[in-house]
Amino acid sequence: MDNEKKCSLCGEPLSRYGNKKIMDGVLCRNCIKPASPWLSDEAYLKLSLEDFKGHLAYREENKKELEEFKDSKKVEGKYVLYLDEEGRKFALSKRKDYKKDNADVFTFDQIKEISIYEEKYGDTEDLDVFFDMKLDNKQIDDVLFRVNEFPGLIRDSEEHKNAVDLALGYLEAFEEEEGIDFEQVEGE
Ligand SMILES: [Zn+2]
């Protein structure tokens, strides 16, 4: 019996791509669908099967959180940032309907650190712009994404400037809110 070829959660045979390794097994593409998009491969590796079940329960709870979520401010981009200023919460989504997308709801108080940085794209001189938030959240402790839609921006091009402006726009949206206490790291 080759257990490695089966999903640890549903027991279905694994497909060639889209599986995720966890601490004590492998999850199939279908089982990870409802999981948060902010779980990195490294984060998966730190999860046991029981942890992952807990994560899925959290994702169900998140749907209820979203019912209460009232977006009062948004910053448009590849990811749209939604702020519920009264509830002091936020969510980020790539999809048109962030509620349908079950975008993770975080509170302003969970933000520990925000950094904006650039990285060279492969072996080229081109750049990517990243936005990284460290969070004090049991399920997701890092929200990290490339701000530019397509990788590899020519330095000082219009697209490059737009990506930097967008990253700063996300940052400013949080800075404008009263009493969020986070560290800001730039140009890592
Ligand atoms: Zn599965």
Image (spheres, rainbow, N blue to C red):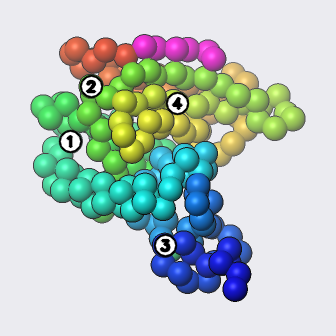
Q: Which residue is mark 1?
A: 71
In the image, what residue occupies the spot 52% across and 14% down?
185
In the depicted structure, whether residue 98 falls above or below residue 131: below
At label 2, the amino acid type is Asp
In the image, what residue occupies the spot 48% across and 73% down?
9
Q: Is mark 2 within 8 Å of ligand 1?
A: no
Q: Is mark 3 within 8 Å of ligand 1?
A: yes
Q: Is residue 77 visible?
A: no
Q: Give neighbour class at mark 3: few <14, some 14-19, many 20+ (Cα, 10 Å).
A: some
For the magenta stretch, what is the residue range? 183-188
> Which circle's residue, 3 or 1, is located before the other in the chain?
3
At label 1, the amino acid type is Asp
Q: Which residue is mark 4?
A: 131
Q: Magenta includes 153?
A: no
- For discs 3 and 1, the disc positioned in front in the rendered view: 3
Q: Is residue 51 visible?
A: yes
Do the residues bearing badges 2 and 1 touch, measured as CB atoms within 8 Å?
no
Q: Mostly what secondary structure, the magenta segment? A: strand
- For discs 2 and 4, the disc positioned in front in the rendered view: 2
> Which circle's residue, 2 or 1, is located before the other in the chain?
1
How far apart are the alpha carbons under marks 2 and 4?
Answer: 18 Å
